[in-house]
Amino acid sequence: MLSSADAQRVADLMRETAAAELLPRFRTLAKEEIREKGPGDVVTVADVASEQRLAAGLARILPGVPVVGEEAVEQDPGLVDLIDRRSAACWIVDPLDGTANFASGNERFAMIVCLVHDRQAIGGWILDVPRARMAIALKGQGVALNGRAISRAKPERPPIGYVGYKVRKEFNRQLPPERRRTLGEVSTLRCAGVEYLEILEGRADFNLYRMTRPWDHAAGTLMMAEAGGAAQRFDGRPYEPAQPINSGLIGAVHPQTLADVRAVFEVARMPLLAGLLSD
């Protein structure tokens, strides 16, 4: 459905959009150009302009394929239903992942695009905008970061990962010391796109998210799978872009790492995950 030339056109579009809409606004936003969609959920004029440019460019690459963008969904929540269609395709777009970081002048922000067909991710792109790192994955064809093929083996050290502040605090409180030592450092960058690239680079090995908005995770989970890993919902079923956003996600670069991390978190029986961790 998507040629290698078209995959490169998507990457070029993302770089062009970042240069035109994001970088000129970084650390130059006025107060009135930033607002809250909800408590702690920030959006800026850069998000909107970036999404509009991406949507127009993607329509030229695959005419007739609709775009499910994070900001468009705010205006029309029904757009997410396009992801759950059998034998149909759509783009999923996060025009500025890590908006709160961007708005505060923190350089951890990214752009994410995913192509879904028949409810499955078949193409994924993540651009770390400040560092110009680009990862591209096509289903069944592997994943590359800055043109270098990525394949991750099981880490020899205790696995390092990304989890949210509240989950980290709770499992540090609950886990017996001997179980806690089976995991390495856990932290958050507050930007899923950059976290996925750090995992591909080998600086971390797993991630865990309570909320799984498709524009944050559809591309990254495809990349982890293409690098040799996997991603599961909290109930043990495979991650899918169309899953309910409260289904949770545990992903890792190696299946055994995923099993090991899952076992540690289930031991804790954290109230934050109560009712979701079950097999």
Image (cartoon, grey):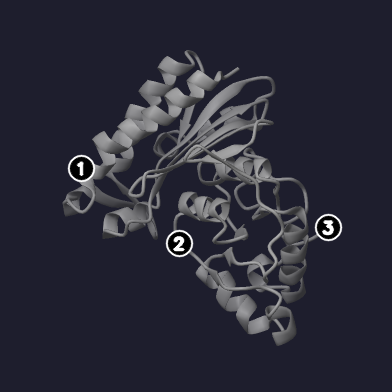
Residue sitting nearer the eye, 173 or 61: 61
Label 3, on which residue? 279
Counting from the top left corner in percent of width and height, residue 24 is at 20, 42
Label 1, on which residue? 24
Q: Quadrant of residue 267?
A: bottom right
Residue situated furthest top in the rendering? 63
Q: Quadrant of residue 14?
A: top left
- Marks 1 and 2: CB-CB under 8 Å? no
Query: Split into 4 quadrants, where in the image is the C terminus?
Result: bottom right
Label 1 to label 3: alpha-carbon separation: 48 Å
In the displayed structure image, the side of residue 279 where residue 186 appears, left or right: left
**Tag in front: 2 or 3:** 2
Residue at disc 2, secondary structure: loop
Label 1 to label 2: alpha-carbon separation: 22 Å
Residue 108 vertical placement versus 6 (above, below): below
Label 2, on which residue? 189
Q: How many marks?
A: 3
Q: Quadrant of residue 154?
A: bottom right
What residue sits 45% from the left and 55% below the top? 191
**Residue 37 tag number:** none
Residue sitting nearer the eye, 101 or 256: 256
